[in-house]
Image: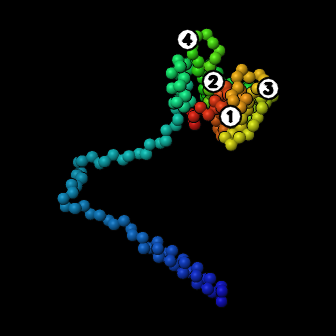
Amino acid sequence: MTPRITSVGIGALLLAIAMTGCSASAPEATTPSPEAPQPSASAPADPVTTPTPLATPAKPTCETMISDGTVSALTEVGWTAEEEEEFVIGDVTMSEGLLCFWADYSVASDHGQLYGWSPITLDDATRAQSSLLAQGWTREDGPDGIYITEDPQFSMGTDDAGYGMTYLFGDGWVKFADTREGLILIDWAG
């Protein structure tokens, strides 16, 4: 008796679903009212709008790669950015990437901040990480990706947690800053 009740219940459910689909009202055909102007044969038809394809992001600049607040803070103290000639990670050149050095170029100093971003293939990321690790850098896996950080004993400067220059390898991109903490200032998504 149970199988019959189950099949009757399923049949009733399927019938209810089918009837719900039938009861949905179809769009009503509308006829223009006599007062509405009718398009004439000589009037041009409304242009067909073509959906705009999603814009591919432009290449980052030193001013767009980092947050607006960071740019404001750096420029307020008289710093400007210069693009470095090459963005190289280990033995891999990031030809589509950007590496910027922010500093006060009106005085002779080596004090400044580095920020970099580039798209990267999985093969290049693997090669770059292997090259850095072979040079004594350290690896840490994090929720955002893979961090590769220089040995702090050779660092020119470190953040509050003791990290110096650090790369963050994500899915198809890599970020770079002169400290791990500095990575949060890079907001280019690419």
Instruction: Tell me which numbered mark, 4 or 1, is placed earlier along the sequence.
Output: 4
Give the number of the disc on residue 46.
none
Q: Is residue 3 left or right of residue 190?
A: right
Gap between marks 3 and 2 measured at Cα: 20 Å
Gap between marks 4 and 3 measured at Cα: 34 Å
Instruction: Tell me which numbered mark, 2 or 1, is placed earlier along the sequence.
Output: 2
Image quarter for residue 1?
Answer: bottom right
Give the number of the disc on residue 114.
2
Residue 26 image position (x, y, % from top left)? 39, 68
Does residue 130 appear in the picture of this structure? no
* Mark 3 Cα-neighbour bin, 10 Å: few <14, some 14–19, many ≥20: few
Residue located 39% across and 70% down the image: 25
Give the number of the disc on residue 106.
4
Which residue is at the front of the view, 133 or 125? Answer: 133
Q: Is residue 37 above or below residue 52?
A: below
Question: Disc 1 designates what residue?
Answer: 168
Q: Point out the frontmost of discs 3 and 2.
A: 2
Question: Disc 3 designates what residue?
Answer: 135
